[in-house]
Amino acid sequence: MALVYVALLHFPVYDKNGAVVTSAVTHMDIHDIARSGRTFGVRRFYVVTPVAAARELSERILAHWGTGHGAAYNRTRKDALAIVRLTDDLDRTITDVELDAGATPLLLVTSARTRHPTISYAALRRLVHEGGRPLLVLFGTGWGLTEEVVGRADYLLPAITGVDDYNHLSVRTAASIILDRMCGARDQAEEALS
Amino acid sequence: MALVYVALLHFPVYDKNGAVVTSAVTHMDIHDIARSGRTFGVRRFYVVTPVAAARELSERILAHWGTGHGAAYNRTRKDALAIVRLTDDLDRTITDVELDAGATPLLLVTSARTRHPTISYAALRRLVHEGGRPLLVLFGTGWGLTEEVVGRADYLLPAITGVDDYNHLSVRTAASIILDRMCGARDQAEEALS
């Protein structure tokens, strides 16, 4: 299995009007994506923000669940949040992955706006199961990752859709669905295809 | 396609210590599951609680997004929340589905504790795509649906797992993953199996 990493970027992302902004860190995102990450075998989940105060607050909350009262209250939450790392920007995140994995990760970008994907989920699932280079999956908060970040990706994943072109998922749930498609255990009938 | 309904139960559910309780309504759950539901073609998403004050507060918040300032601010949120219905209990929820669909729904239960599932996700996906009876998927808040509710199900779905037996997902993300497995659009390579 390839090592899988996830990064949730709070900068640079678009706001509702297309301006490049720094979004606020939402603690529900950290908990939900950490829990999904732990479930699907993600090695590290990076919460990426240039705002030092936001990283410090997050570190305090993580300490509560990691070693404080919360660790005794909810052991499974402690296990999930143990994969969280706080970083300043994408470049330092990539460096941390390189140090951990011993190789430069392939960058995967997901966006509800992707019109021309360059890899299918089935192919991504094969990449995971065949091993090889580590994979770093980038998610954007706010109204999504900027074109600059999207342009750095090795692969663009298809937007997640169902019955029509409505695809306004929360980043928490989009990340979980993508991790499930990449790494989730499957029925035998389903495994036949991947 | 079969009509798909989702219900999020706040009673009867277990608390951390196994007592049967009524859990608080979490508005993040309503938004996230409505957004996922709208994406994956869910016809109605029932928020089920016996607490009248909780239903009234939720109705006010839904009105904000449906017809108030929120409707103009975020049109896609309005579209998602339009599928939400508030009901008192499971029986009245089933009655509402019967009135809407003209047939009694098959009850599907998902639980992180399920040890003996009675349907695979591949088979469930076939049920959806073949049409036939409406499907009502039940999710529990707190520490999960009681045995009484689980005992009413026509089908028990497998717990969602990844690399090991850790499966402590939030109900928001678990619901989204299950809807994606049931109804999500797939790559052609993936469609070959379903």
Image (cartoon, coloured by chain):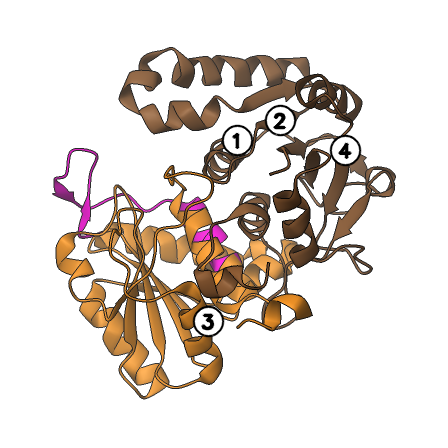
Chain colours: A orange, B brown
Q: Looking at the picture, which amino acid does disc 4 mark?
A: Val
Circle 4 — which element?
A: strand
Q: Are marks 4 and 2 in contact (CB under 8 Å)?
A: no
Q: Which residue is mark 3?
A: A125
Left or right placement of residue B167 versus residue B113 in this view: left
The tag earlier along the polypeptide, 1 or 2, is: 1
The tag earlier along the polypeptide, 4 or 2, is: 4
Q: Nearer the viewer, mark 4 or mark 3?
A: 3
Q: Are marks 1 and 3 in contact (CB under 8 Å)?
A: no
Q: Nearer the viewer, mark 4 or mark 2?
A: 2
Q: Which mark is residue B47?
A: 2
**Real-space Cα separation, disc 1 to disc 3, in angstroms:** 30 Å
* Region in magenta: A11-35
**Real-space Cα separation, disc 4 to disc 2, in angstroms:** 16 Å
Q: How packed is label 1: few (under 14 Cα within 10 Å), some, or many (20 or more)? A: many
**Real-space Cα separation, disc 4 to disc 3, in angstroms:** 40 Å
| Residue beneath the point at 74% across and 21% down | B98
Q: How packed is label 2: few (under 14 Cα within 10 Å), some, or many (20 or more)? A: many
Left or right placement of residue A161 versus residue A150 in this view: right
Q: Residue placed farthest to the bottom in the image? A: A102
Q: Looking at the picture, which amino acid does disc 3 mark?
A: Arg
The answer to whether B171 is drawn above or below residue A37 in the figure is above
Q: Looking at the picture, which amino acid does disc 2 mark?
A: Val
**Pointer 3 indicates a residue of which chain?**
A
Q: Are marks 4 and 3 in contact (CB under 8 Å)?
A: no
Circle 2 — which element?
A: strand
| Residue beneath the point at 50% across and 63% down | B190
**Real-space Cα separation, disc 1 to disc 4, in angstroms:** 19 Å
Q: Are marks 1 and 2 in contact (CB under 8 Å)?
A: yes
| Residue beneath the point at 50% across and 40% down | B40
Q: Are marks 1 and 4 in contact (CB under 8 Å)?
A: no
